[in-house]
Image: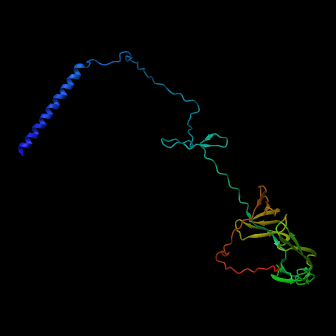
Amino acid sequence: MNKIYDKLLLLLAGLALLGGAALFVLKSGADEFGSSGPSQPAENPYVAVPVPESGSVEAEWPEPLPQSSGPDWLYDVFTPPKIYIDKDGLFTAEPPKLPTPPEPFGIFLVDVARKLYRIQFEGYIEEDLSDASKSLILLYDEERKIQIRVRPGEAIAEAELTVLDFMIERKFDPAESTVLKTVKLELMDERAGEQVTFIHGERLFDSTVTVVVASEENPEERIELTEEGASFELASAQYVLQKINLEENSATFEKQAMGDGEAEVRVLSPQFIPQENEPDESDAEVLPSIEVLDLNF
């Protein structure tokens, strides 16, 4: 075994000797054929460029200085200033100002509603299709909360009314292949001394409009108004109901001037604020509704 290791070491030493000899021959051959002086391009020699002398220059800043010394313009190394654009399209350091909320008006509008007429036409039972005068008319007294059954030509003293006429008109619609029926009821309101006409399926409202306003400080403090021009005091101020707009469901109020102030006019729309003792609808008991059937064929 020792002889084998000796032969291997001898072989490696010989290879190292041969490699060193080959490297020496190659290096000596390159030095023989190479140039000993610095190499330069034959046609484009380097031209020395003179180095200009730098002198100190003093900067002159125009007036005013580019950076203001005011407290709004704040500069830092890594935090640039916040710059805004004003209404004229110019840059500014002043942040935009939020609009000032209007002064409290003192009152808000709860509701604008027309009251139901004291008698409502709920339905009818047609006993004879060829004679409407034999029908039984179903009315509802909103004041007494009771139903009234009456026939054409009959008078009800308790309700202060008389049935003048009851008409059922049928027209055939060829386009829809259906019969269009129009039912009208005419009553004499003995209390008001005027004739009232009802259309079946439509609710009749009184001519009186009720406007309900409440105090912003105390919503439980409310006032009901029924006519334009009415003045009232609420939330320690005087107000006048100038106009009622049923189409837009709004009302115009004037808050009269106090001291050296000026009168203020606003158009208010209804808004609702629940009372503290008002029960939640989710906890309320659901009662079955009473439906009046129209037994007509």
Image quadrant where residue 152 sits: bottom right
Image quadrant where residue 203 sits: bottom right
Q: Quadrant of the C terminus?
A: bottom right
Decide: is 60 above or below 117: above
Residue 67, percent from left and from top: 55, 36
Taking the view exactly as shown, the residue that stands out farthest to the top is: 43
Residue 260, percent from left and from top: 77, 55
**Toward the viewer: 55 or 138?**
138
User: Image point 55% across, 30% down: which residue?
Assistant: 61
Decide: is 26 above or below 217: above
User: Image point 73% across, 80% down: which residue?
Assistant: 289
Residue 101, percent from left and from top: 68, 55
Image quadrant where residue 182 sits: bottom right
**Toward the viewer: 207 or 38?**
38
Side (left or right) of 223 relative to 45: right
User: Image point 48% across, 42% down: which residue?
Assistant: 78
Decide: is 271 above or below 288: above
Side (left or right) of 17 relative to 175: left
